[in-house]
Image (cartoon, helix red, strand yellow):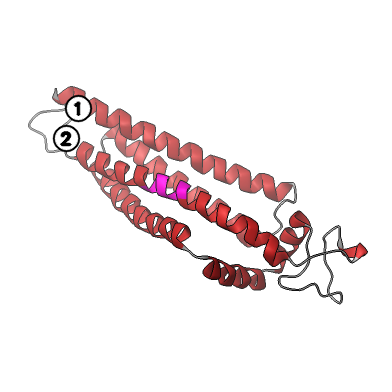
Amino acid sequence: MGCAGFTCSKHSLCVLNILYVMVSLLMIGIAAWGKCLGLVSSFQVVGGIIGVGVFLFFVALAGLIGAMKHHQVLLFFYMIVLFMVFIVQFSVSSACLAINREQQDQLLEVGWNNSQSTQRDVEKSLNCCGFRQVEASLSCDAACFPNNSCSPCADKIQEHAGEVLRFVGGIGLFFSFTEILGVWLTYRYRNQKDPRANPSAFL
């Protein structure tokens, strides 16, 4: 029974961390692909996504190595980091799901004003100019700009913002529960004795 429980915990933890490795590589690949194709010109956005992907990759790698070797110290730090990530992700996901339209509008305007490269990406993809009003004196990459037929971007962004926040919040909430599952599995597995090791050894 002890052997079966130990093996089950080990395999479950390995599968969970392989999933995290795949998600991290997917995040890095999508960000790099978007940058190469020019879909996203903002270095801060691409760098942020790649940074999160690399961080998740190393955390998952530490968990995978710790699970395979039953390494006490590595599993302890993995458990602490994963719990901290859970707290942050659960908080952000809950905020995404709870945010109202007025708060969405304020956040979108702050984000719009903070990055000109993001403005250009949005204008090009949504075919709009300016945030609340179209200013003919300013340049715009949208296809509608030469014809003076552009509308402001605020309304178009707002149409998609609610759906995106709900999607991101839902995905984040799902992964936050897999993280707390990972913390529980790590705690359980770390306190189990390897049946193949010396029974008198402290594990």
Whether residue 175 appears in magenta in the rendering, the answer is yes
Extreme residue toward the bottom, this view: 137
- How packed mark 1 is, by other alpha carbons closer than 10 Å (few <14, some 14-19, many 20 or more), is few
Q: Look at the picture and state if 10 lies above or below 72.
A: above
> Amino acid under label 2?
Gln
Residue visible at 16% across and 38% down in the picture: 203
Specify which label sits upstream in the sequence, 1 or 2: 1
Residue 5 circle label = 1
Residue drawn at (16%, 27%) of the image: 197
Q: Is residue 150 above or below residue 69?
A: below
**Which mark is in front, 1 or 2?**
1
The image quadrant where one finds the N terminus is top left
* Mark 2 surroundings within 10 Å by alpha-carbon count, few (fewer than 14), some (14 through 19), many (20 or more): some
Viewer-nearest residue: 202 or 13? 13
Q: Which residue is mark 2?
A: 192
Q: Position of residue 104 (x, y in %)?
A: 55, 66
Residue projecting furthest to the left: 200
Report whether residue 118 is seen. no
Label 1's element? helix
In magenta, the rendered stretch is 170-176
- As drawn, 12 above or below 109: above
Residue under the point 53% across and 55% down? 165
Q: Where is residue 65, by image quadrant?
A: top left
Along the line of sight, the residue nearer the viewer: 178 or 129: 129
| Contact? badges 1 and 2 (CB < 8 Å) | yes
* Residue kind at label 1, given as amino acid type: Gly
Q: Tell me how far mark 1 sits from mark 2, CA to CA.
A: 9 Å
Residue in front for this viewpoint, 100 or 66: 100
Residue at the spot 54% in from the left edge and 66% down from the top edge: 101
- Position of 101 with respect to 66 (left or right) is right
Q: Is residue 76 visible?
A: yes
Q: Where's residue 127, x and y in %? A: 79, 58
